[in-house]
Image: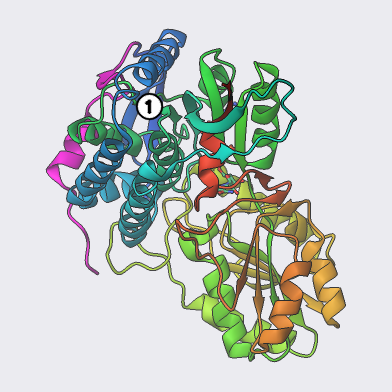
Amino acid sequence: MVEVSILPQVRDFMNRLNGQFINGKTVVSQQDEVITITNPATDEVIAHVATATSGDIDYAVDSAHRAFHGGWANVSPAQRGLLLNRLADLMIAHREELAQIETLTSGKLITLSRAFEVDYAVSFLRYYAGWTTRIEGKTVALSLPSANGEKYTGLTLREPLGVVAGIVPWNFSIMIAVWKFGSALACGCTAVIKPSEVTPLTMLRVAELVIEAGIPPGVLNVVNGPGQQVGHALTTHPKIAKVTFTGGMETGAIIGTAALQSGFKRVTLELGGKNAAGFLPDVSPEKTVEGIIEAGFLNSGQVCASAERYYVHRSLINNVAEQLGKRLATLTPGDPMDDESRFGPLANRSHFNKVIGYFTRARDQNLTFIHGGGAFDLPGCYIQPTAVLARSENDELMRQEVFGPVASLLAYDSVDELVTLMNDSPYGLAASLWTNNLSQALRLIPRVEAGTVWVNMHNYIDPAMPFGGTKGSGIGREFGSAFIDHFTEIKSVIMRY
Ligand code: NAD
């Protein structure tokens, strides 16, 4: 065991009453409506955060609106990139502090908090910073005839949209927020971020670093509180130009509808998945088992792109199931604040209860548990790593997103059946194909309905690769140059001379 000592600055930060971060300062307007934060590894209350009042929300949006037309509009693209890189430097300088706040709040292993919430988040931020000087319009050759010898010149400008509301889930509270505000700020927009009500802390600390980096007050604001009040008020606020949301499919439908109905706001929706991994028969059972562990058990399965449906050839499935059960038995639970832990708790009690509910119903439906299927006998939200043999593609565990450490296996007989089964879902976020036969993989990729298809790997996302869902997994793409289209508007200019 290598238990990490909690830094004094982390204790101080958790002990004070936090609330919102608006116009460069901490704001706590009311103390009667407070979010109580419980460490999911221990069930201990560790912090309190005041929720935003409607006045706070107006103040945050107004500050962002003023900064959009003032402080941020006057910062050159190159300077914007420099400031985002300075923030990245500061996040690295405060790496351990940010990682500890995140781990204590969300139960994420400290090693994962360092890697994803700081190092990966910083890679994304630097990627966005690199685009600030490359956002360009075009000159256009015009075609209509000129009656009296007059000439026309056409050009397009790419203009930032305005104030962006970024609504964020609890599974990666810094990294996903960076996807939102990094893209927004790089394009010249300003932002109001609403973290999940169960992980409201870490972005407040990042917002303080934004000011330390020299980014003007009001450019990035953070408001906290329940989605149906604070999130809804942001989504429908008249001065918000765009909503970028990551979260569940049902919430995405509500937010998308509300954003359109309140002034046709622009919307990006990154929603859930019920992602499939298809193993072709040339892959050994040993490699299949390691593939399932890679695809399904990172961050205890609380990754939107994780696989939850696994298709294995009928001739191999019993062998794979037996070896998978043994492998899952080695995933023993550990304290997330221990450097050597490899399997942590779920992020909160309500999610824990939801996952246990899936197990209960799967038992009632007589599904075969290969391993797990319950909670560990420990304080905290520890769920056993679980695998089941599904009976058909209609089982609840083959259709509903669990968002936990649960792999459901189903046998297939032919490659055509494999493709049909993989596509049999309202979701289409990500999928993986596992085979040693490259031409087989290349033929199958176009047939798989998903925004990302991995070959012999899963869960790898990179700032340079567009990421987003097809079908019910969302609208729009983050990362790659694709983000520029979603945070800017094209203005056409035509001149006669
Ligand atoms: P959620 O949809 O319950 O909540 C996400 C955010 O939306 C929270 O901040 C919440 O307060 C807010 N919200 C809820 N109702 C709202 C409303 N009516 N108006 C405005 N805001 C509202 O999701 P969650 O439980 O926090 O996260 C888990 C889900 O997120 C899973 O479905 C997962 O697949 C998805 N997810 C997707 C991606 C992706 O990139 N596609 C990444 C991570 C998580």
Q: Is residue 60 left or right of residue 492?
A: left
Residue 438, x across and y down, in percent:
66, 86
Q: Is mark 1 within 8 Å of ligand 1?
A: no
Q: Residue at x 47, y 10 (%)?
A: 54
Camera-side residue of 268 and 309? 268
Q: Compared with residue 197, is residue 347 higher up or lower down, i.e. above or below?
A: below
Where, quadrant-wise, is the N terminus in this rendering?
bottom left
Q: Compared with residue 106, is residue 155 higher up or lower down, i.e. above or below?
A: above
Question: In terms of image quarters, where does ligand 1 lie?
Answer: top right
Q: Kindly state the secondary structure of the residue where label 1 is placed.
A: strand
Residue 226, x across and y down, in percent:
51, 25
Where, quadrant-wise, is the C terminus in this rendering?
top right
Name the residue type under label 1.
Answer: Val
Camera-side residue of 316 and 383? 316
Q: Compared with residue 10, is residue 232 higher up or lower down, i.e. above or below?
A: above
**Which residue reaches farthest left?**
8
- Residue 325, by quadrant, is bottom right
Residue 200, x across and y down, in percent:
39, 33
Q: Is residue 492 visible?
A: yes
Camera-side residue of 74 and 241? 74
Q: Is residue 367 visible?
A: no
- Residue 389, by quadrant, is bottom right
In the rendered structure, does residue 175 fall within the stretch colored magenta?
no
Residue segment shown in magenta: 1-29
Q: Residue at x 66, y 51 (%)?
A: 469
Q: Residue at x 41, y 36 (%)?
A: 181
Q: Is residue 391 left or right of residue 105?
A: right
Q: Compared with residue 159, is residue 233 higher up or lower down, i.e. above or below?
A: above
Q: Is residue 473 left or right of residue 25?
A: right
Residue carrying label 1: 222
